[in-house]
Image (cartoon, rainbow, N blue to C red):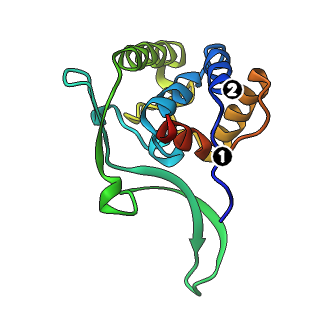
Amino acid sequence: KPEIEILTLEEQTRLIQASYRFRYGIFIRLTLTTGLRLGEVLGLKWENIDFRSGMLYVRQTLNRLEKIDYNGIGTKTEIVIQAPKTKNSLRSIPLLPFIAEELKNWRNVQLADKTIAGENYHDTGMVVTNPLGGYIEPRTFKDYYNQMLEAANIGHYTFHALRHTFCTR
């Protein structure tokens, strides 16, 4: 097995600081405080967050999977929103108060996007959305994440390293 990657405390601090300069930085901070997988972050819906109790509920994932044709051959991929793979992946996660506030602020960003886009906005109920309300592809989000890593000047880490970092801390 490959060795598990985790960010050092200094790298984590630099990434958090850099994340504030990016539209989707909130989701790096969310991952570092909850241990969510990328598909769980991208599949998160507003109905899965209870601000009163300060809980986040993992109920679905958004992933790009191989599309199998009628011959059982997979030559293309498609975005799939589905229940997590295992029952243990369905879980409740407490939110730190500052992350709950940042998520509320993110909701205001989405409302501003909706105002700007007008009738072109598609309200999907998703938490992670582009300026028109659509979901963000995992590959696209990884590009944004890599930009944040570069801005933090800490080298390359997989997105999953954030989950390992959370678990280690």
Q: Which residue corresponds to the image point at 41% horizontal and 20% vertical from the top-left?
A: 99
Relative depth, front residue between 81 and 20: 20
Q: Residue furthest left?
A: 53
Above or below: residue 73 compared with residue 18: below
Q: Earlier in the sequence, mark 1 or mark 2?
A: 1
Q: Position of residue 108 (x, y in %)?
A: 42, 13
**Where does label 2 land, which residue?**
11
Q: Which residue corresponds to the image point at 67% horizontal and 46% vertical from the top-left?
A: 139
Q: Which residue corresponds to the image point at 59% horizontal and 87% vertical from the top-left?
A: 71
For this view, does 134 lie left or right of residue 66?
left
Q: Position of residue 90 (x, y in %)?
A: 30, 52
Quadrant for residue 64, please give it.
bottom right
For this view, does 155 lie left or right of residue 34?
right
**Where does label 1 land, which residue?**
5
Relative depth, front residue between 45 and 5: 5
Relative depth, front residue between 21 and 133: 21
Looking at the rendered structure, the secondary structure element under dot 1 is: loop
Q: Amino acid at mark 1?
A: Glu
Q: Amino acid at mark 2?
A: Glu
Q: How much space separates mark 1 and mark 2, taking CA atoms?
A: 12 Å
